[in-house]
Amino acid sequence: MQYETRFCTHCATPLALLTQAEDGGDVQRLRCPACGWTHWNNPTPVLAAIVEVGGKVLLARNAAWPVKMFALITGFMEAGESPQEGIAREVKEETNLDVRSCTLVGAYEFLRMNQVIIAYHVVAEGEVRLSPELVDYRLFDLHELKCWPAGTGYALADWLRTRGHEPVFFTAEENAERRRGLDQPAAKD
Ligand SMILES: [Zn+2]
């Protein structure tokens, strides 16, 4: 669900589009006419993990996704944790696996959701038990993996290159088939 910020989080006054001088010049943003609070609308950090377990890569399917759509483990960063702690927590919560090592792959935009994806490669151990949020998972050999044209898919591609595999992306048709049913509720974008 998309939310729209309409009221000041400090004093509950309705926000207005107001122009104000900032470091980069005059900028129009939603601001509070009463107390001066600015709605910066900064991107939200999201953590993503390429989970390697027993030499294979685990991709999982969210309960809300179409049957062919498998992707990285992701989750929002929480207050008070480092990104490395956050991704280890997410991997444990979503798969029950214990993260043994964690290496940054890169940071990627996800403009449509106003998020920035911080992607890690993690080596994990244990017995997979999915959280209720996830309904299925698959373990892939590196040469079987196909990447998708979005932030986490580019992270997977960048990581595969570091392992000596030239990434293969889904064709446009394959990607449409993979995502079929996903975009319908939000057809306006
Ligand atoms: Zn205010």
Image (cartoon, helix red, strand yellow):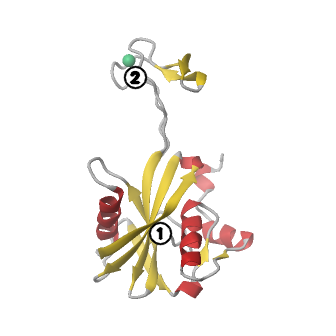
Q: What residue type is labelled 2?
A: Cys
- Residue under numbered circle 1: 72
**Circle 1: is it few (<14), some (14-19), or many (20+) Cα within 10 Å?**
many
Nearer to us in this view, 159 or 134: 159
Vertical side of 33 occupied by 158: above or below: below
Q: In which quarter of the image is ligand 1?
A: top left
* Image quadrant where residue 132 sits: bottom left
- Residue under numbered circle 2: 8
Look at the image and tell me whether residue 76 can be seen.
yes
* Image quadrant where residue 9 sits: top left
Vertical side of 88 occupied by 37: above or below: above
Look at the image and tell me whether residue 63 can be seen.
no
Nearer to us in this view, 146 or 135: 146
Which residue is found at the position 36% from the left and 53% from the top? 77
- As drawn, is 179 to the left or to the right of 44? right
Earlier residue among tags 1 and 2: 2
Whether label 1 touches label 2, CB < 8 Å: no
Percent of width and height locating residue 36 = 42, 16
* Image quadrant where residue 135 sits: bottom left
Vertical side of 13 occupied by 55: above or below: below
Q: What residue type is labelled 1?
A: Leu
Q: What element carries label 2?
A: loop
Percent of width and height locating residue 101 = 34, 74
Percent of width and height locating residue 142 = 54, 85
Which residue is found at the position 31% from the left and 50% from the top? 78
Percent of width and height locating residue 83 = 36, 57
Q: How far apart are marks 1 and 2 (CA)?
A: 35 Å
Q: Is mark 2 within 8 Å of ligand 1?
A: yes
Nearer to us in this view, 63 or 152: 152
Which residue is found at the position 68% from the left and 67% from the top? 176
Nearer to us in this view, 163 or 67: 163
Which residue is found at the position 62% from the left and 71% from the top? 178
